Amino acid sequence: MCGRYTLLIEQDELEERFDARFADSEPEFEPRYNAAPGQELPVITNDAPDEIRRLEWGLVPSWAEDDSGGIINARAETIDEKASFRAAYERRRCSREGNERELDTPSAGRCLVPTDGFYEWVGTERGKQPYRVAFEDDRPFALAGLWERWEPDDETTQTGLDAFGGGVDETAPAAGPLETFTIVTTEPNELVADLHHRMAVILEPGDEREWLTADDPSELLEPYPAEGLHAYPVSTAVNDPSIDEPSLIEPLES
């Protein structure tokens, strides 16, 4: 499972690394030390690969009755089978019953989720200990993601994804279309296996555009090699999604 991550670089570095730009109307990006589900976070979608957009973490399929219960992770082994993910993975519109058609206007697809590290938790006698997994040089990379646009009916109310402390007003009227994303996970490599039985799909830089455009990108969903990655324990303050500060990524003193 991937339930929190970091993105520490400045906006100009982010744009240069992914050869994409935030729209002028977007607020300036600030580094994130505790990106959490329910938040709007930077992604790069297949329908606009030269733009960085903010989508809400927690995928809501287009056929869902409301926008609650967003799905934060999708298993690589079943994304081409499950109705919740098949539309985005195959870049089609898909109903709960499995009926599908080509999209005139893209409303589902694959995306890149920029990051430079993610957190995993390990059970100990004193409770769950968070670890940050990152490259040893802290370089940014992309996780494989899926995105989808959900549009409310006139009588739908917006509930949002509040299980992770988002504090969404459950009685607020729906404001319009909601664009969401999920992170694809696979089997762990040797490093992450000591922390969790799943890991996010890390893409090689040369494979990022293939993930967005290929008819069959399934070969990209293998565990990323452990070489060059490291994991270290961090403060349990990361458990609180309202805390987003540099101290979260500092290694705990042994």
Image: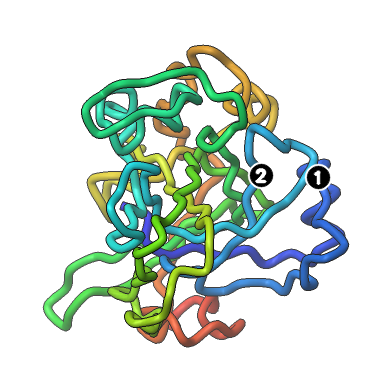
Q: Position of residue 243 (x, y in %)?
A: 49, 87
Quarter of the image with the C terminus is bottom left
- Rendered location of residue 2, percent (x, y): 37, 55
Q: Is residue 64 left or right of residue 152?
A: left
Residue 244 is labelled as none
Q: Residues within 10 Å of mark 2 (few under 14, many from 20)?
A: many
Q: Quadrant of residue 210?
A: top right
| Label 2 – label 1 distance at C-alpha | 8 Å
Which numbered marker is on residue 20? Answer: 1
Q: Are marks 2 and 1 in contact (CB under 8 Å)?
A: yes
- Residue picked out by circle 2: 44
Specify the amino acid type for callout 2: Ile
Q: Is residue 166 left or right of residue 145?
A: left
Going 17% across and 79% down the picture, which residue do you hit? 127
| Residue at 36% across, 37% down | 189
- Residue closer to the observer: 163 or 249: 163
Locate residue 25: give its quadrant: bottom right
How far from the left and from the top, in percent, is residue 120? 34, 61
Give the class, few, some or many, for how many residues have Cα within 10 Å of label 1's Cα (few <14, many ≥20): some
